[in-house]
Image: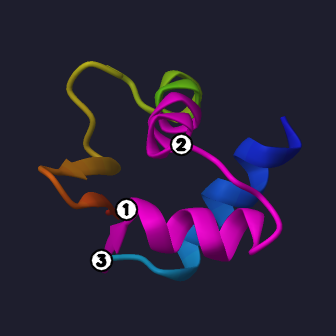
């Protein structure tokens, strides 16, 4: 989807950085959107299913517990 493409570009641009759900929400969706952080998690889950060999054991979009995510190539 368009959102997943934007999200993937954002992760690639910020490779290796720990990204909070809030910063992802603001930088990908902008200030005009009121989203739940769970919405971010849902989009990440969908993206993982498309790019990870084993989505339940991600190697590229890694969860940082209680913070957000980190992208690794």
Instruction: Tell which of 7 and 37 is nearer to you.
Output: 37
Q: Is residue 35 magenta?
A: yes
User: Residue visible at 76% across and 72% down?
Assistant: 30
Q: Is mark 1 on a helix, strand or loop?
A: loop
State the image coordinates of residue 64 (x, y, percent, origin top left): 17, 55
Distance Cα–Cα, label 1 vs label 2: 27 Å
Where is 10 relative to 46, above or below? below
Q: What stretch is highlighted in magenta?
A: 17-44
Q: What element carries label 2?
A: loop
Q: Callout 3 environment at 10 Å: few (<14), some (14 to 19), or many (20+)?
A: some
Q: Callout 2 environment at 10 Å: few (<14), some (14 to 19), or many (20+)?
A: few
Where is 2 relative to 33, above or below? above
Residue identifier under label 3: 16
State the image coordinates of residue 9 (x, y, percent, origin top left): 67, 66
Quadrant containing the C terminus is: bottom left
Instruction: Tell which of 15 and 21 is nearer to you.
Output: 21
Q: How is the image coloured?
A: rainbow
Outermost residue toward the left in this view: 65
Q: Which of marks 1 and 2 is in front?
A: 2
Residue identifier under label 1: 73
Q: Are marks 2 and 3 in contact (CB under 8 Å)?
A: no
Residue identifier under label 2: 36
Q: Tell which circle, 3 or 1, labels the residue nearer the N-terminal end.
A: 3
Q: Does the magenta stretch include residue 29?
A: yes
State the image coordinates of residue 18 (x, y, percent, origin top left): 27, 74
Distance Cα–Cα, label 2 vs label 3: 24 Å
Distance Cα–Cα, label 3 vs label 1: 9 Å
User: Residue visible at 65% across and 76% down?
Assistant: 27
Task: Decide whether the magenta segment is chiefly helix, strand or loop.
Answer: helix
Q: Is mark 3 on a helix, strand or loop?
A: loop
State the image coordinates of residue 56 (x, y, percent, origin top left): 26, 19
């Amino acid at each position: 989807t368009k959102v997943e493409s934007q999200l993937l570009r954002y992760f690639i641009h910020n490779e290796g950085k720990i990204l909070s759900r809030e910063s992802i929400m603001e930088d990908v969706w902008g200030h005009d959107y009121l989203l739940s952080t769970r919405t971010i998690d849902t989009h990440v889950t969908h993206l993982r299913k498309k790019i990870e060999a084993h989505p339940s054991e991600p190697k590229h979009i890694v969860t940082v517990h209680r913070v957000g995510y980190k992208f690794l190539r």
